[in-house]
Image: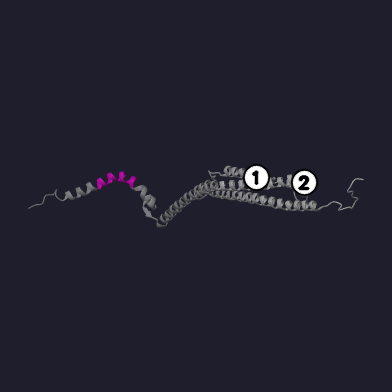
Amino acid sequence: MTRSPDRPTKPRSLTAGVIASALALAPVLTPIMATPAQALFGLGGGGRIVYDPRNHAENILSAARALEQINNQIAQLQNQAQMLLNDALNLARLPHSSLARLQQAVGETQALLADAESLAFDVAAIEEAFARDYGAAAAEGDFDAMIAGARQRWETSVAGFEDALRVQAGVVGNIEAARGQMETLVRESQGAVGALQAAQAGNQLLALQSTQIADLTAAVAAQNRAAALEAARAASAEAQGKENLARFLDYGTGYRPGNARLFRD
């Protein structure tokens, strides 16, 4: 059988068609592949794509350094924001103040001392009273004057003990208020959000302690004052008793004999 002359030409026609199709798609694929290829590779002579590993590594290192710098800047900004927040908390003032209540308690104690019915807590007044009514002055004057002076000194001693009891009652009354203030200040100190609030709470606790010391000082002073007045009264009474005894035993000029007439002439 004789072979047909057309059969050998079919493979060549198919190959030519594939090549023609590839050439037709080349302008479309070129823009898609060009950018990534140029980014990772270099172009050699004649437009050939050449891979440069050193350039690729340098690009990666540069990108890593840039990312690290950005992370460092973000961390610095976060630290600065935290520092500003801490500064704001440290400068926050304590919302509670017990100064007015403490001053009121001290004022009440001072008022009790100022209302003393006996000798006042004044150096000049005490010196004048002792020079007039106590010690050697208690033995001066006539009998009625000495009795009046003794009675005045006794009334002053009784008033001194009354004043001491009043001051002690006021100090005891301040204990409950001090306990409430102490509880509030300790709670504020434990809940302080910054250094300033903690310091202010501590200062107010010290002020509360100073108030209690002032109350204790006032109570001790009032008690000692009453005891001193009673001791001064006892000493004055002793001096007065000695004077009265001396006057009682004083017979004047003594016995003088004279002429006696028993009957009328």
Q: Position of residue 197 (x, y in %)?
A: 54, 47
Q: Residue furthest bottom?
A: 54
Q: How far is the residue under mark 2 from the one under mark 1?
A: 35 Å
Which residue range is magenta in the image?
19-32
> Which residue is pictured at 30% across the width and 44% down the height?
28
> Which residue is pictured at 22% across the width and 46% down the height?
17
Q: Is residue 164 magenta?
A: no
**Residue 43 as seen in the image, left or right of residue 158:** left
**Residue 257 as seen in the image, left or right of residue 166:** right
Q: Secondary structure at mark 1?
A: helix
Q: Position of residue 184 (x, y in %)?
A: 51, 47
Q: Nearer the viewer, mark 2 or mark 1?
A: 2
Task: Look at mark 1 in the image and give the residue it sits on.
Answer: 113
* Residue nearer the viewer, 126 or 28: 126
For residue 193, say whether it is visible: no
**Residue 256 as seen in the image, left or right of residue 154:** right
* Residue nearer the viewer, 180 or 244: 244
Marks 2 and 1 in Cβ contact (< 8 Å): no
* Residue nearer the viewer, 228 or 51: 228
Please tell me whether the stretch drawn in magenta is mainly helix, strand or loop.
helix
Quadrant, the C terminus: top right
For residue 23, say whether it is visible: yes
Amino acid type, residue under disc 1 in the picture: Leu
Going from the N terminus, do you reach mark 2 or mark 1 first? 1
- Density class for disc 1 (Cα within 10 Å; few <14, some 14-19, many ≥20) is many
- Density class for disc 2 (Cα within 10 Å; few <14, some 14-19, many ≥20) is few
Q: Is residue 25 magenta?
A: yes
* Residue nearer the viewer, 31 or 248: 248
Q: Position of residue 103 (x, y in %)?
A: 60, 43
Q: Position of residue 154 (x, y in %)?
A: 69, 47
Task: Look at mark 2 in the image and give the residue it sits on.
Answer: 143
Amino acid type, residue under disc 2 in the picture: Phe
